[in-house]
Amino acid sequence: MDTKYLLALLLACFTFASAQKPEYATLLIPAALSENANAVIRSNEETYTINSQNSLTVRTVTACTVLNEFGLRNLQTMSSYSPTTRISKIEARVYDKMGNQLKVFKKKDFRDVSLADGFSIFSDNRMLYLDYTPIGYPFTMVLECEYQTSNTAQIPRWSALSGYFVSTESDKIQITYPENLGFAYKEVNFDPKFQIEKQQLPGKVIFTARNIPAVKGEAESPEFFKVSPIVHFRLDKFSLEGVDGQASNWKEFGQWYYERLLTGTDELSAETQLKVRQLIGDEKDQIKIARKIYAYVQDKTRYVSVQVGIGGYKPMKASDVDKLGYGDCKALSNYTRALLAAAGIPSYFTLVYAGDDSRRGLMPDFVSPQGNHAILAMPYQNGYVWMECTNQVSPFGFQGIFTDGRDVLVIKPEGGEIVRTKPMIEKDNSRVATGKYMILADGSISGLISTSSSGSAYDAVYNNQRLSAKEREKHYKESLDNIGSLNLEKIEFTDDRDAVRFTEKIAISAPNYASINGSRVMFAINAFNPFTDTPTRYRNRQNPFRVERGYLEQDEFEIAIPEGFDIEAIPSGLELKSKYGEYSSTVTRKLPNLLIYTRTFLMKDGSYPSEEYEKYRQFCEQVAKYDASKAVLIKKT
């Protein structure tokens, strides 16, 4: 045989063999890992080498088998970089269900895009991203990435599971570190049911997870980071975008932040300080002065995002915000701090995890750069007034659901302090509705509703006054979708910003609200606020559940019935009391043609085990059932 032909044949065989990865064949996935899974992490290896206080080398290799289209979201096809983080290698390989290689993507095949979010005017963060569309399912993608960074302040956390509906076959992280940097870690949500091994060696720690079945996502389940085994990592001696730091507790961290990132950023011109004095005049009341300054900031500035180097952590100078009229959350909070200081009022820059869906707080027992937002804390009467400085329309001192009820870091000149922001409790989150409506003989309805909202209910509705006419009509028709062919005849708003109470007055009419059957007219008593959010039924609930925000609803309505009709039946009164909430409802006859409907519904905050889910579901089902109760009118003969 010709030598060249033999070499070519051997090379082809080697190439074919290297392109095959039988271990990625879908048939090899254990049945327990396929159950409830949209994707399976076949193997994940993360190696972090901390070379020094300002040098970290990372290598990751992740093989993910995507079982269906819902598993696509679990592909890791991107890696971000910046002037302080350099990607030296990124590569992806795709295999079919038998483990045969289909495609190889090199670094040049990845799209290089900005991480600007649409409103960031300064951003030097970028991302390499692979836009991959599969030709079928299942398939496996292996992503290999290596990068170097000078940032050691935020070492990525490790999770033994990637999310709901994703199982783990093998996942390993190894961190090597100089022992003089004060390396530490924190294990969260570890449980014997998760197969996780730990090796602690001098200058090295290794965590390995094996054969962990997917956790099925269920309605009202906690956020995944609250149930998945996670390990957080940190250094006492760290570097953040070129700024070295050292902290072993929150006091030290706050002091470092104040001295290295805040000092010198709060200076204002003599002209601006004069404006502050003219603005407050002879006012002596601290709250009234702060209200004026807060309103001044709202009128003068707008929010933009800044994500450039240390500018992602260090605020712009207050004098620059004063000139330009814009800034990010750090800059606007710092600017407000400077204006208050010019008025002789102390306040403190504060780091927080902000978000509407969860009261996620900083970890009080684990010191590291945490939080995704900045607000301002003004000392007042043995507590704090919290100021959200990025919102041009929110009332003074109103946090809303964005930052309430969570641990934050208040940064003072003498150091940092973990403080809990004021939570909005159930009875503060109130919605009080009064009004009247009339049922006509043809089944149509007309009425007037006045609803006063506070707390989280205020947060949900106070921006309705800023909707366009078209958006407003769409919103209220969706809110009152139990009334078909709804006509909005008049809408009036009153925003009491001092009391933080928003009132909506709405006049409505609609044909065919009541159903007619011969001489009878039947209609649902609760026309304007029926509870319909009955939780999903599960035969074998697995996850705990959480009612994130409780609330209180109180309704009282007069209901006029048409002339020539009598009341044949009305719902009987009902009172429910459980650990999940309370409900009461009554319908009484005041006059021959007038009914009075009253309703009180209290839903409580709480976290509960899976065993209680069915009781909670039944409570909600009872409320929904009674809210749908109907009255029956009969035509007089």
Image (tube, helix red, strand yellow):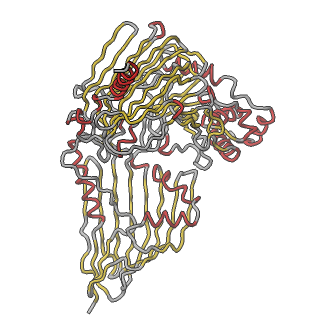
In the picture provided, is 122 more to the left or to the right than 218?
right
Q: Quadrant of residue 524?
A: bottom left
In this rendering, the answer to whether 538 lies above or below 530 is above
In the picture provided, is 338 more to the left or to the right than 77?
right
Where is residue 75 shown, x and y percent of the image? 40, 37
In the picture provided, is 397 more to the left or to the right than 104?
right
Determine the residue positioned at 23% across, 52% down. 537
Label total for image: 0
Where is residue 447 shown, x and y percent of the image? 45, 74
Say whether residue 380 is visible. no
Quadrant where the C terminus sits is bottom left
Question: Depth check: 519 or 41 in front?
Answer: 41
Question: Depth check: 363 or 423 in front?
Answer: 363
Furthest-bottom residue in this view? 637
In this rendering, the answer to whether 516 lies above or below 402 is below
Determine the residue positioned at 34% across, 16% down. 206
Determine the residue positioned at 77% across, 39% down. 275
